[in-house]
Image: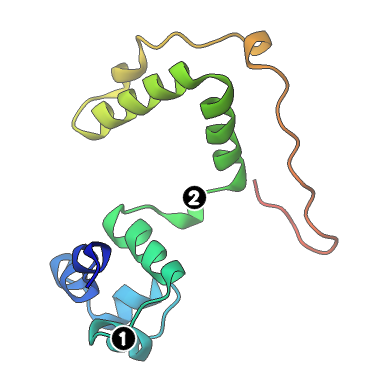
């Protein structure tokens, strides 16, 4: 058994969250019967493992995550790694019990220093984008 599989025991996570199988698995697009099979030892595909980790372990509301968020993160990592590290530290401190003032000491670059925004690909015709 791989370390990742031992750490990510879906039955244990579900029980700790106090959820039944239907509640737990439908949040990540898996049927209750499919989730039951995973809890009984069937191999979970990697995308299901990642969704389980993001939604139930990291407690991320995926409906709030947009492509532009990842583009911004990528841009900061590449163009302003020091700022990215500072923001990441501040976010961790804030999540650990800090408050909004955790961001107060971070020097933000001017718009000129940031450069032009990246252009997002357009949605295919007939599909609406919801940024």
At label 2, counting other C-alpha atoms closer than 10 Å, the crowd grade (few under 14, some 14-19, many 20 or more) is: few
Q: Which residue is mark 1?
A: 42
Which residue is more in the foreground, 97 or 3?
Answer: 3
Say whether residue 126 is left or right of residue 53: right
Q: Position of residue 123 (x, y in %)?
A: 77, 54
Q: Quadrant of residue 41?
A: bottom left
Q: CA distance from mark 1 to mark 2?
A: 30 Å
* Dot in front, 1 or 2: 1
List the single residue furthest toward the front: 1
Asked if 60 appears above or below 89 in the picture, the reply is: below
Say whether residue 44 is left or right of residue 29: left
Q: Position of residue 74 (x, y in %)?
A: 56, 34
Q: Using the image, tell me which numbered label, if any, was put on residue 84.
A: none
Q: Using the image, tell me which numbered label, if any, was put on residue 64.
A: 2
Residue lying at 55% horizontally and 10% vertically, measured from the top left:
109
Q: Position of residue 66 (x, y in %)?
A: 57, 48
Asked if 128 appears above or below 16 in the picture, the reply is: above
How many dots with numbers? 2
Residue lying at 77% horizontally and 46% vertically, measured from the top left:
121
Asked if 16 appears above or below 11 in the picture, the reply is: above
Q: Position of residue 80 (x, y in %)?
A: 53, 19
Which residue is more in the foreground, 26 or 88?
Answer: 88
State which quarter of the image contains the C terminus.
top right
Among the two numbered marks 1 and 2 on one chain, the one whose residue lies closer to the N terminus: 1
Determine the secondary structure under disc 1: loop
Determine the secondary structure under disc 2: helix
Question: Quick check: marks 1 and 2 in contact, CB under 8 Å?
Answer: no
Q: Quadrant of residue 97?
A: top left
At label 1, counting other C-alpha atoms closer than 10 Å, the crowd grade (few under 14, some 14-19, many 20 or more) is: few
Residue lying at 34% horizontally and 91% vertically, measured from the top left:
33
């Amino acid at each position: 058994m791989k370390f990742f599989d031992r750490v990510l025991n879906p039955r244990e996570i579900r029980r700790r969250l106090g959820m039944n199988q239907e509640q737990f698995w439908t949040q990540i697009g898996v049927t209750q019967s499919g989730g039951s099979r995973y809890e009984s030892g069937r191999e979970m595909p990697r995308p299901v493992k990642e969704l389980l980790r993001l939604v139930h372990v990291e407690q991320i509301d995926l409906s709030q995550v947009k492509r532009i968020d990842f583009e911004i993160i990528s841009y900061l990592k590449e163009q302003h790694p020091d700022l990215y590290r500072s923001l990441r530290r501040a976010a961790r401190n804030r999540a650990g019990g800090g408050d909004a003032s955790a961001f107060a000491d971070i020097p933000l670059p001017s718009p000129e220093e940031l450069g032009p925004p990246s252009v997002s690909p357009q949605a295919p015709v007939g599909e609406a984008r919801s940024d």
